[in-house]
Amino acid sequence: MKKHILGFPRMGIRRELKAALESLWKGELAFDLFEERCRELRLRHWTIQKDAGLSMVTTGDFAWYDHVLDTAYMFNAIPERFRALPKENGELYFKMARGDERFNTPAMEMTKWFNTNYHYITPEIDKDFVPQLNAEKILKETKEALDAGFVVKPVVVGPITFLSLAKGVDGYNCWEKAAVLVDSYAQLLAELAQYAEWIQIDEPILAGELPEEGRKIFVETYQKLNAAAGNAKLLLATYFDSVDDNLDLALQSGCAALHLDLTRGGKNLDEVLEKFPQNMILSAGIVDGRNIWKNNFAASVATLRKIQAKLGDRMMVASSCSLLHSPVDLSEETLMDPEIKNWMAFAVQKCSEVAFLSDYLDGTCDWRIAAENAVAMQERAQSSRIHRPEVKERLASVTSDMLSRKSPYPVRRKAQESLNLPLFPTTTIGSFPQTPEIRRTRRALRKNEISQEEYVEFMKKEIAFVVQKQEELGLDVLVHGEPERNDMVEYFGEQLNGFVFTQNGWVQSYGSRCVKPPVIYGDVSRPAPMTIDWICYAQSLTKKPMKGMLTGPVTILCWSFVRDDVDRETVCKQIALAIRDETADLEKNGVRVIQIDEAALSEGMPIKKRDAAAYLKWAVESFRLTSTPVEDETQIHTHMCYSEFNKIIRAIAEMDADVISIEACRSKMELLEAFREFEYPNEIGPGVYDIHSPRIPETEEIVDLLERSLQYEPAERLWVNPDCGLKTRRWEEVLPSLEHMVAAAKIMREK
Ligand code: GLN
Ligand code: ZN
């Protein structure tokens, strides 16, 4: 029985790829040395797969920046603005990803890869696109692996997924290029077929929302591709959800094997087995590639046996998706609590799990490993570290009145007049510039180089400075500036029960950027207040309202690795109750304005439209649970760095925050179009200062943006604020920008 993974993380255990990329970009590392380091990483990752006992190693999964960009590049889908650049030393490739400041050439857009936190480069296709195969990279890497003695399985992003994710330039319909693009794919497969028995072709769109154009051409496309592959066998890979509406296409594809994600898409396994063609192999994605939990062997074997009973040896054992989304190696976690560590598996361990499960079915495994696994599972199921009866009881006793404010918005608005805010009130989103000194001081505390008292004193000085600057600027609702937070999720996770942090659990977010998500392993609760001291200190320095600053439950959930023994809704609501206590404590301590950030609300959206409503229901309930324990006089804000509102506008309104601030600047307020059809009932602050750019906006520009906003929202309900927090900006940019923002608000008031 074949055993394989769909891809391995590229970064390296020490984030070697990040270091190499950043040195290359700074001009400190020559290109051939950069490639040499990449080659070492590839060899290391193939060795891990082989040593684990996998039957073949994946090639072509290693991208300098992103594998979708690799695909665009390979087929010559190079936007006009880059075409004249030299291809040597990756110059053109990296410019596509990162833009070219000297010539003001914007980078290609980035989008989230389905519902993961990985971002791919969105291919751009225009009417002049002529596909032309340049397979140098994947061929080189595949030969490299062959020469080193590995059995290879190259992987490519399939044409239907590629076209589904691409965006047509100026409204061009990308599908018009399908036929010529498929010809190039056929050429590619013919080349790869010389080296490999199996070629993996990823079509995750089959488990998502496949456009009608893609449906229409799917089967004929795969007929062509299978013919082109000749003796090599195509493994059609799907993941992240079940293949149901498109199951007929997958089964008629004529591919030698179909890969299914059984961790997120196993719901219709019975139907799949019922309809599975006689000559097809099923690659069972049973080891979750997107989390950090040890596989439950007993449960997995039960599923695999069921497949085996129906298909006999026409099966493979695999990871659910590429391991790109999981950290590299658990054995590097030397500081982690051993009990919790024993419940986990990272990419290296997952390779062994795949191999083990296959050997188990074959009866050739080491049974001691199965026994150890069973013990770990049992300990986890019963651990008092995870299961806190008081948390479960509290969640069970949530009543519907805990999901609503005392009065509806119009009544609250009246009550909040006591805040004495002017028309077009000005505020910021929370953070102020995080200077090197601030970062150094946080680091020094972590390394015990300074005392807690010294730390607090420094932070208080910083807060006082930020408050004073805001007073001078004449802002209406102030913030404390968040100097004590290095990350909006980590800050809360570190203070909540049920969270643990890794040392090296990095996962690629995009390009050289990695994130180290907290791990939620158990029932979540709040042992003590988390923000009160800082906010109250800040409030004591000013007569203006000080905005308490919290991260919302959905965002904490979406940016963490989440336990897999209860559903996400339960985890989210546990977090919500913990933050709810913080909201109540802020109010109790005299804080009259409280912002609860939900930057990630839209990131949690399921892949399939039909699942959206159920998600939004519990996501909104979680936010309401967090935000409603307060009196009518207390003003609740929320913030979202997100501008495609049309799909979720109703859900956002149902969150019933008194004020929402959103990103709007880059789209020149176009996002407010969503409010044409649906009037947002409460107050709203569409960002008027693009904090993603160092540029200082002029007063007139801001006035102009505010006037545009007036077409959608009445003046009484408009706020004036930047797009997002200011922590990545410098004071030199922030001060004049906010000065202009406040001036613009004054002009609007006079008008
Ligand atoms: N309050 C946070 C800040 O200002 C919000 C960050 C975010 O939306 N990503 O930094
Ligand atoms: Zn934001």
Image: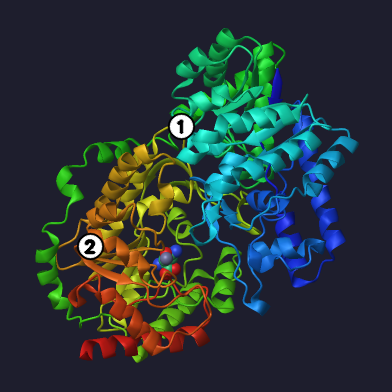
| Residue 240 visible in rendering | no
In the image: residue 387, left or right of residue 237? left
Secondary structure category for the residue under label 2 = loop
Name the residue rendered at 70%, 24% in the picture: 3
Local crowd at mark 1 within 10 Å, few (<14), some, or many (≥20)? some
- Give the amino acid at mark 1: Ser
| Label 1, label 2: how far apart the Cα atoms are | 46 Å
In the image: residue 326, left or right of residue 536? right
The quarter of the rendered structure image containing the N terminus is top right
In the depicted structure, whether residue 147 falls above or below residue 356: below
Sequence-wise, which precedes: disc 1 or disc 2? 1
In the depicted structure, whether residue 118 falls above or below residue 79: above
Secondary structure category for the residue under label 1 = loop
Name the residue rendered at 41%, 73% in the picture: 665
Residue nearest the observer in this picture, 718 or 83 = 83
In the image: residue 562, left or right of residue 704? right
| Residue with the mark numbered 2 | 680
Residue nearest the observer in this picture, 212 or 614 = 212
| Residue with the mark numbered 1 | 383
Q: Position of residue 382 (x, y in %)?
A: 44, 28
Residue 103: quadrant of the picture: bottom right
Q: Position of residue 739 (x, y in %)?
A: 39, 89
Q: Position of residue 750 (x, y in %)?
A: 21, 91
Colour pattern of the rendering: rainbow
Residue nearest the observer in this picture, 187 or 286 = 187
- Give the amino acid at mark 2: Tyr
Local crowd at mark 2 within 10 Å, few (<14), some, or many (≥20)? some
| Residue 281 visible in rendering | yes
Name the outermost residue toward the right: 147
